[in-house]
Image (tube, rainbow, N blue to C red):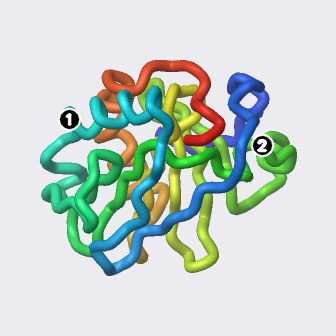
Amino acid sequence: MNIFRHRPFGLLAPALLIAVAGCSSADDSATVAVPSPDAKTATVCRELHRVLPRKLDGHGRDDPEPRSAYTAGWGNPAIILRCGVVRPPKMIDPKVAEGGDPDAIAGGVNGVDWLMEKQGDGTWRFTTAGREAYVQVSLPKGMSAQDEGTAVLTGLADTVKKAIPKGIASMRG
């Protein structure tokens, strides 16, 4: 399955294209920035946290510090999930929508749309689109978007669909 085929980003709800940047990347540390979602987003993020898998792509759950209902981790170095982040700027970049940005591609896995972004340090970050909360997954150095990324997103798809309804995410994350 090639989840990162170029497909028009315009297929995602235009209303998703509203807010400011989110930042984070997975690294070898077990500390991550905790998002500060609004009340509606916080509710769905807490539900997601409640139903996240204990294992993801063969990696055991090992949540980062500080502990939060808005973050989760698997493995060491960790695959990091953050729920309630603000929309990444590339989600509204016309170059991405037109397939003209080699470092950002829209795609979907098992019914969940994602924006895939290659970070400056060579790591990969995925952010959901078309959901009531932005969920961001960062792979640590050495994990490829095509191989491990596909397995990680496949492992999270049913959980995201169950906990985060389709819709428009808050501008605040």
The mark found on residue 50 in the picture is: 1
- Badge 2 marks a residue whose secondary structure is helix
Identity of the residue drawn at 33% across and 25% down:
163
| Total tally of numbered discs in the picture | 2
Quadrant for residue 162, please give it: top left
- Callout in the foreground (2, 1): 1
Determine whether 139 is above or below 171 in the image.
below
The mark found on residue 92 in the picture is: 2
Determine whether 118 is above or below 141 in the image.
above
Identity of the residue drawn at 26% across and 67% down:
65
The three-letter code of the residue at mark 1 reads Arg
Q: CA–CA distance between discs 2 and 1?
A: 30 Å
Q: Position of residue 167 (x, y in %)?
A: 56, 20
Camera-nearest residue between 160 and 70: 70
Quarter of the image where the C terminus is located = top right
Identity of the residue drawn at 52% across and 58% down:
125
Q: Position of residue 24 (x, y in %)?
A: 51, 65
Around disc 1, counting alpha carbons within 10 Å, would you say few (fewer than 14), some (14 to 19), or many (20 or more)? few
Determine whether 86 is above or below 138 in the image.
above
Around disc 2, counting alpha carbons within 10 Å, would you say few (fewer than 14), some (14 to 19), or many (20 or more)? some
Q: Is residue 121 left or right of residue 61?
A: right
From this viewpoint, which residue is outermost toward the front? 39
Please tell me which of labels 2 and 1 falls first in the chain: 1
Camera-nearest residue between 130 and 41: 41
Q: Is residue 7 left or right of residue 46?
A: right
Q: Position of residue 48 (x, y in %)?
A: 30, 34
The three-letter code of the residue at mark 2 reads Ile
Q: Is residue 55 left or right of residue 96?
A: left
- Badge 1 marks a residue whose secondary structure is helix
